[in-house]
Amino acid sequence: MLPLVFIFSILFGVAIGFIIPWQIPLVLSKYVSVAILAALDSLIGGLKASLDNTFNSKIFLSGFLLNALLAGFFAYLGDMLGLDLYLAAVVVFGTRIFQNIAIMRRMLLMNFNKKKEER
Amino acid sequence: MISKPNLTFIALCLFITTIFTVMLFKTRESIYREVGPTTTQEAVSYLKELNIKKEELHKEKESLELRKRQLSAAYVEKGEFIDLVNNEINKLEGYLGYKRVSGLGIKIVLESPEGYIVSVETILDLINDLWSSGAVAITINEKRVTWETYFELTEEDLLMNEMEINQPYLIEVIGPEDVIRGTMYMPGGFVEKMQLRGINVEITKNVPLDLPSRGD
């Protein structure tokens, strides 16, 4: 059930993304890519929180939107200041994504092992 | 396990993120397509493609140049042909007397001192000599001589197209002056024959002439 929902979300997202005629303006592409990275970090964080049973929808939604907007804004600010601030966002969000995935992996494996021992 | 409301939230956010990712992908992809290769390997294959295209374009250029040369040659030939035809038409119109003809020419005056009428044969000899010398237009007493001109001798008069022509006979000719003059003065030629018959022949070169058409 879990993978199916995510797979359908991704497939619908890809389909709609290709169907709609708009593109991200070239000047904004760098900021949007950083924002997408932040959104992915929030998504992975949300998944981890769900597995932990600590998921809060308000925290998740605010984090999803604010992180994405702030990451994009910081990338823009960095460009204005002549400082590659987007690199900081990439490093931070990238590290968090890998950490959260590692934690999720451990949790899923532990659950799997527990179920196996119960049998 | 993840609860249903949580799953909906996360799936919705994933859906939105995917849409933005695809939109971004479309933007970046068009840039990559325009910019060309970004790695050495891509650059090498791109260079090979460019070389192939260059060779194809070079061949196309050569074939187009060949075609251009052929077409321009054909055009020149066509132009020359048209000029030739136009010249021929002008020449024939001159012979037929359809047009007025102007230019430098020769004036020949025939006069019999004793008032004898010059024979039709003499006039025909003269006209044939002039045509064969390359004359373009001929008039006798300001009447155009054409292919349908005919002469007739009555007891008292020489008629040209049934119109009387009187002495002195003024023959004006446009054509190659030196050739015509040479033909007239050649041994046994027209001038010598006329002198033997006692007819005066006076030939003047480089006379500006404006000969009428046959209808004038």
Image: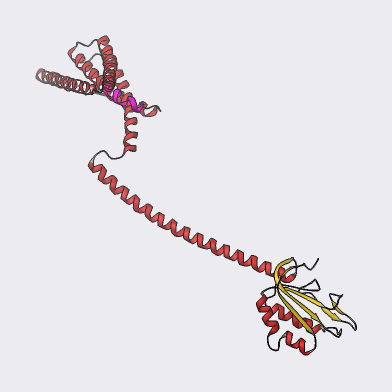
Q: Residue A119: where, in percent of width, then height?
A: 11, 19
Seen in the picture, residue B214 relative to B200 is either above or below; the reply is above
Locate the N terminus of chain B by quadrant. top left
Residue A45 drawn in magenta: no
Residue A47: image quadrant is top left
Q: Which residues are magenta?
A: A22-36
Instruction: Identify the residue at the far right of this view.
Output: B155
- Seen in the image, is A7 located left or right of residue B176? left
Q: Residue B3: where, in percent of width, then height?
A: 24, 13
Q: Residue B9: where, in percent of width, then height?
A: 29, 15
Q: How would you classify the magenta stretch by its main secondary structure?
A: helix
Applied colour scheme: secondary structure
- Seen in the image, is B84 located left or right of residue B127? left
Locate the C terminus of chain B by quadrant. bottom right
Inspect this view and state whether residue A19 appears.
Answer: yes
Seen in the picture, residue A55 relative to B40 is either above or below; the reply is above
Instruction: Identify the residue at the far left of this view.
Output: A117
